[in-house]
Amino acid sequence: MTSMAAVLTPHVPYLRRFARALSGSQQSGDAYVVATLEAMIEDPEIFPSEMPHRIGLFHVFLKIWNSITVNGQTPAVEGSNDNMPADRRLENITPRPRQAFLLVALEEFDFDEAALVLGTDEATIRELVDQASREIAEQVLTDVLIIEDEPLIAMDLEDIVGSLGHTIIGIGRTYDEAQAIVKERQPGLILADIQLADGSSGLDAVNDMLDFLDVPVIFITAFPERLLTGQRPEPTFLITKPFQPSTVKAIISQALFFERRAGRKKVA
């Protein structure tokens, strides 16, 4: 029979990453990870055997984390010695939404998986991520360019971006329209479809912009196979149509909060 240590060990590095982001420092995060592992060694029954191993490990960790009163409070943060700006800013996000956001955005749990981790339902997770996204947006408000040729989808994206407090500088339906907008005002984030109205390419538009811009790019497409080729580089952020508004909000916040920039990508 495989031991619990053997099945959980591959997931521990990811739990350490999560704990660091949640607590604001590697030292503090590791202390909670060690406490979690020691608790399961002492009492294996606390591990929910009905859950997949990764989900169960995070579930036990957060159960212990949330049992400490101070972890349920939002501290007034004036400064930090941590080297990661995102870690410092995370301390200002309301605790439970912060947990849901990190599970979804950093650890890439699906919403239903995050619900199991936090012991709630999927609808609640989406609400928590939405709240975290709004709180994050207050810290990283920016100008957004939307490259999308379908009017209804463009309107949906405009509503989603606006609900987070960001400013839409324009909606480009074609390569030329998108380039014209950028010449007038540079965005801090780009949301881009791949196939545009006149047969031009949103991917080409973005690639050419990245010659003089250093911004995160989120591709929103019905044709993910055109980007996910298995060859590098691939886009850091990719949303498949049809999409859930909560997914778009989470990815926007992730792209801005963790300051991941886009790399140039050419497709034959």
Image (cartoon, rainbow, N blue to C red):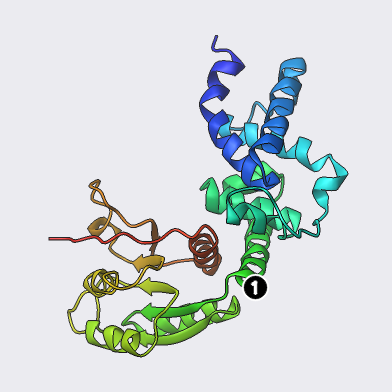
Which amino acid is tagged 1? Glu
From the viewer's perspective, is 20 left or right of 245? Answer: right
What residue is drawn where x is 51% and y is 26%?
10
The quarter of the displayed image where residue 166 is located: bottom right
Residue 68 rendering spot, x and y as whole percentages: 84, 40
Quarter of the picture containing the C terminus is bottom left
Using the image as rendered, state which of residue 98 and residue 243 is in the foreground: 98
Residue situated furthest top in the rendering: 1
Q: Which residue is depicted at the point 44% across and 86% down?
A: 169
Q: Position of residue 56 (x, y in %)?
A: 64, 33
Provide the secondary structure element on which disc 1 rests.
Answer: helix
Task: Please say if 100 is above or below 155.
Answer: above
**Residue lying furthest right in this view?**
69
Which sits in the foreground, 42 or 29? 29
Could you tell me if residue 23 is visible in this image? yes
| Total count of labels | 1
Of residues 181 and 240, the one nearer the viewer is 181
Q: In this view, does 34 lie above or below 187?
A: above
Residue 107 in the image: state x and y as whole percent. 54, 45
Which residue has dot 1 on it? 138
Q: Is residue 244 left or right of residue 67?
A: left
Q: In this view, does 207 lie above or below 3?
A: below
Q: Is residue 121 visible?
A: no
The quadrant in which residue 151 appears is bottom left
Q: In this view, does 145 lie to the left or right of 98?
A: left
